[in-house]
Amino acid sequence: MANLIINSIYKHKQIQEQIRRSFYENSPPSITLHKFLTEQAINQIKNETTKASYKRQFDTLKYSYSIAKITKNTQILLDSQELLHFLKILSPSITKIPEGYFIELNHQDYSLLHDEKNHKEKTNHCFDLIIDLSDNWPDEAGGKIVYTKSDGEALFVPASTNTLTLVSRAGFGRYIEYCNHKAKKNKRKFILVEI
């Protein structure tokens, strides 16, 4: 899994420079890159999600979702120099990729904005790294990850398999839109790493 991880299009210096500029032009500074990982890497990660031990997290006034620590093989991928080098192009302050989590959303799952108090206590948490693993998640089912400011400014991260999204958290809270009945039996899965 440590050989070719990132899709070759994202390795060209000219493309990397365009991505870096786009990242800082957005508010919040963010970028979503489609088909980011090689097919082999994304398929291996999706296979790893079936081996993870998910635990249901539920507090009616705050959140409802399933979470699991990422597997050893997935952490090896995230620890790759190839991925770290790419992220450093976007922000030189990223020097390490900490352990992340698999998040699984089903019908009736959500996370409210006031759940963010835990994240604000982390002084070293500047970015969210999301790798989407969702197959067949209907857009109209909700479940978008939303970054918002008190002035109403918002960034929506919809489900789209094999996308990498990096978001600067400075001044932005995060919540997950309610997953409505249109989700049916589908699951939205993604990796969340707080950097």
Image (cartoon, helix red, strand yellow):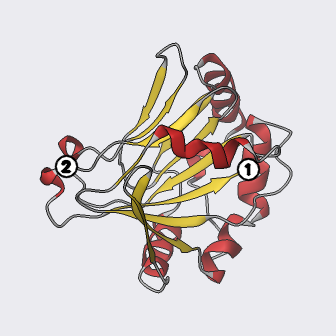
* Residue on which the image places disc 2: 180
Residue located beneath label 1 in the image = 195
Q: Residues within 10 Å of mark 2 (few under 14, many from 20)?
A: some
**Callout 2: SS:** loop
Amino acid tagged 1: Ile
Residue flagged by tag 2: what amino acid is it? Answer: Asn
Depth check: give the residue in front, 151 or 22: 151
- Residue at 63% x, 33% y is 15
Residue 186 sits above or below residue 74 on the image: above
Q: Position of residue 92 (x, y in %)?
A: 85, 38
x%, y% of residue 118?
A: 66, 49
- 87 relative position to 74: left or right: right
The relative height of residue 127 versus residue 21 in the rendered view (above or below) is below
Q: Where is residue 115 in the image (x, y as percent from the top left)?
A: 53, 46
In the image shown, does 66 or 98 lie closer to the viewer? 66
With respect to residue 1, does 120 lie above or below?
A: above
38 left or right of 168 in image: left
Within 10 Å of the Cα at label 1, are there few (<14), some (14-19), or many (20+) other Cα atoms? many
Q: Quadrant of residue 26?
A: top right
The answer to whether residue 3 of the structure is visible from this angle is no
Judge whether 36 appears above or below 15 on screen. Answer: below
Q: Is mark 1 on a helix, strand or loop?
A: loop
Residue placed at 60% from the left, 29% from the top? Answer: 172
Q: Which of marks 1 and 2 is in front?
A: 2
Residue 65 placement: quadrant: bottom left
At horizontal 68% and vertical 65% (from top left) the residue drawn is: 78
